[in-house]
Image: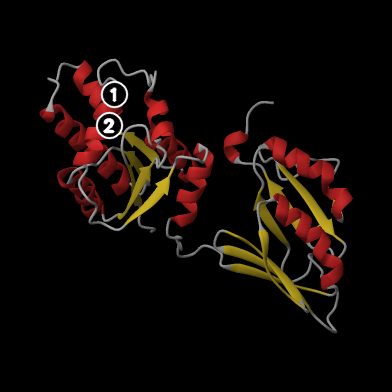
Amino acid sequence: MRCPRLIVISGLPGTGKSAVAERAAAALSAVHVSIDAVEEALLASGVQRGWTAGVAAYEAARAVAETSLRAGTDVVVDAVNDSEPARETWRRAARGADAELHFVVLICSDNTAHQSRLVGRNRGFEQVGEPSWEAVVQRQHDYAPWTDPHMVIDTAFGAVDDVVSELLENLPRRIVSGTVHHIELRVLDVEGSTASWEWLLDRLGYTEYQRWPEGISWILGDTYVVLEQTLNSPAHDRRGAGLNHLAFHAGTREDVDALWNELSRHGWNRLYEDRHPFAGGPDYYAAFAENAERFKVELVADPGDYDDR
């Protein structure tokens, strides 16, 4: 079982924590926990405003985070985390759930841009309120130095998606035991086969990884696909012993439809056209094709995209 991750996005108000945390959580299929949202709920329920309410918000958020982590789900927290007691909250959560802990600190190096983000800001909180620029400057002055390893990202000039991409690219890569490391296909004509595979794998999110005289590979995450030249071998027969086909997650039904419409222009012969897109069954939306060397692929729509259309 993989170790869950607790990713704590920290920084002053106005650095973009909530927006970045929300999108990062979506990209990671993680639970997003916002300290301000928790404190808003506590204040609205009658908890007195002040230091105690702030501590209660951190503890309530920690309990939610720890419960999710113990269930094996990644958690992304957004909080200012300007003191050692605040940071210890997340250390305890990670220890209690045997989770990886990653601190990410957002800064905005352009004070003019930072200040402008706070002008007229309205996140829909009636109780928590929005800080003034003067309050943020004071909080920056009082911000405790970091002693934990942490990632720093400057949000002054990039869009939210750029910041999220940088965050995800710099998180330590995870290797899950039992997942596919790589697939190697031996072909009679590597040069002739490359075009069809290159187009398809590019559309599925792979990028070229390595190239040498007898082969080429493409990588996506921790998995790569290899084509390598073979000599004096019989042609590939997917109906015989050995590899029958490769099946790929291919996105939504619309994504599968788009691939289906383009396959024949990129070296793939469409299969089971009379039964497409339900050749695999009435509740299974997929496209099937084979290339010139008769390697077969299956492009499967995400199960969550199935409906009554």
Amino acid type assigned to the residue bearing label 2 in the image: Val
Which residue is rendered at x = 20% and y = 31% of the image? 57
Q: Quick check: 286 above or below 135? A: below
Figure quadrant of residue 240: bottom right
- Residue 227 appears in the picture as rendered: no
Cα separation, mark 2 vs mark 1, equals 6 Å
For label 1, the residue is: 132
The image shows residue 302 at horizontal and vertical percentages of 61, 41
Q: Quadrant of the N terminus?
A: bottom left
Q: Could you tell whether 192 is left or right of 309 in the image?
A: right
Is disc 2 in contact with disc 1, using a CB cutoff of under 8 Å? Answer: yes
Can you identify the residue that label 2 sits on?
136
Of the pair 7 and 293, the residue shown nearer to us:
7
Residue, x 30% and y 22% (percent of image)?
A: 130
Question: Relative to the observer, which residue lies in front, 163 or 248?
Answer: 163
Q: Classify mark 1: residues with Cα within 10 Å, few (<14), some (14-19) or many (20+).
A: few
**Location of residue 116 by image quarter:** top left
Q: Determine which quarter of the picture holds residue 154.
A: top left
Q: Is residue 225 left or right of residue 188?
A: left
Dot 2 falls on a residue whose secondary structure is helix
In this view, the residue in front, 53 or 277, is 53
Which quadrant is home to the C terminus? top right
Residue 142 visible (yes or no): yes
Up-down relation of residue 152 to residue 174 (above or below): above
Residue drawn at x 38%, y 39% is 31
Residue 34 placed where, x, y %? 32, 33
Q: Residues within 10 Å of mark 2 (few under 14, many from 20)?
A: some
